[in-house]
Image: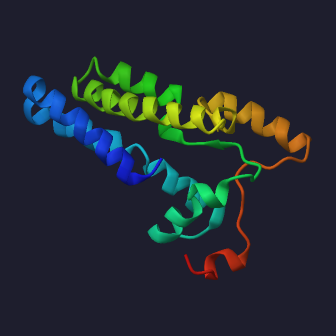
Amino acid sequence: MSLKQHVIQASVASVILAPLLGAKTLIIFLSAILIDIDHYFDFVIVTKRFGIRDMFKYHHPEWQKGRSRYMISLFHTVEVFILLFILGYWSHYFWLVLFGFCLHFIFDLYHLYRHHAISDKAFSILEYLIRRNSLRRNNQKGYPVPDRDFWNAKD
């Protein structure tokens, strides 16, 4: 999903939750958007590039469509969600972050479902490691890697 879509979703949720949580709603708003910072990490690891514009170009659905891919987004994994839940017993702010992550994740799941892409994404670190090794044995790819011309082409 696009950054704009996630900002709209987080904004609507924040407006609804503001009367209940007050300023703490900002934590949910930011976490529902910033969870996607892991996409930047994926981009840097795969492409060895650092530009934000290049990251958005790389993750654009039109470029990724039809390409073999199996990806993990670290902050979108069950292990991170469990860690936030446990840390919530130490400080309730982690539960607010977890709520924002869950809000974001629900919309991501719906988006993946609509595009028949649920199997393209790992929802657990352990799942990713197991399936990635299986894909390698079968000479299949994980993340698609663009060729040099991709970066030079005009949008």
Horizontal relation, residue 118 to residue 50: left or right: right
Coloring basis for residues: rainbow
Residue 135 horizontal/vertical position (percent): 83, 40
Residue pictured at 56% horizontal, 59% vertical: 60
Q: Residue furthest right?
A: 138
Residue 142 horizontal/vertical position (percent): 74, 48
Residue 126 horizontal/vertical position (percent): 66, 28
Residue pictured at 22% horizontal, 23% vertical: 92
- Which corner quadrant holds the C terminus? bottom right
Residue pictured at 26% horizontal, 28% vertical: 96
Question: Which quarter of the figure has residue 11?
Answer: top left
| Number of marks | 0
Horizontal relation, residue 107 to residue 123: left or right: left
Residue pictured at 91% horizontal, 41% vertical: 138
Residue 43 horizontal/vertical position (percent): 57, 59
- Front residue of 54 and 155: 155
- Front residue of 151 and 43: 151
In the picture shown, does residue 40 fall above or below 139? below
Q: Residue furthest front?
A: 114
In the picture shown, does residue 41 fall above or below 154? above
In the picture shown, does residue 124 fall above or below 146? above
In the picture shown, does residue 40 fall above or below 150? above
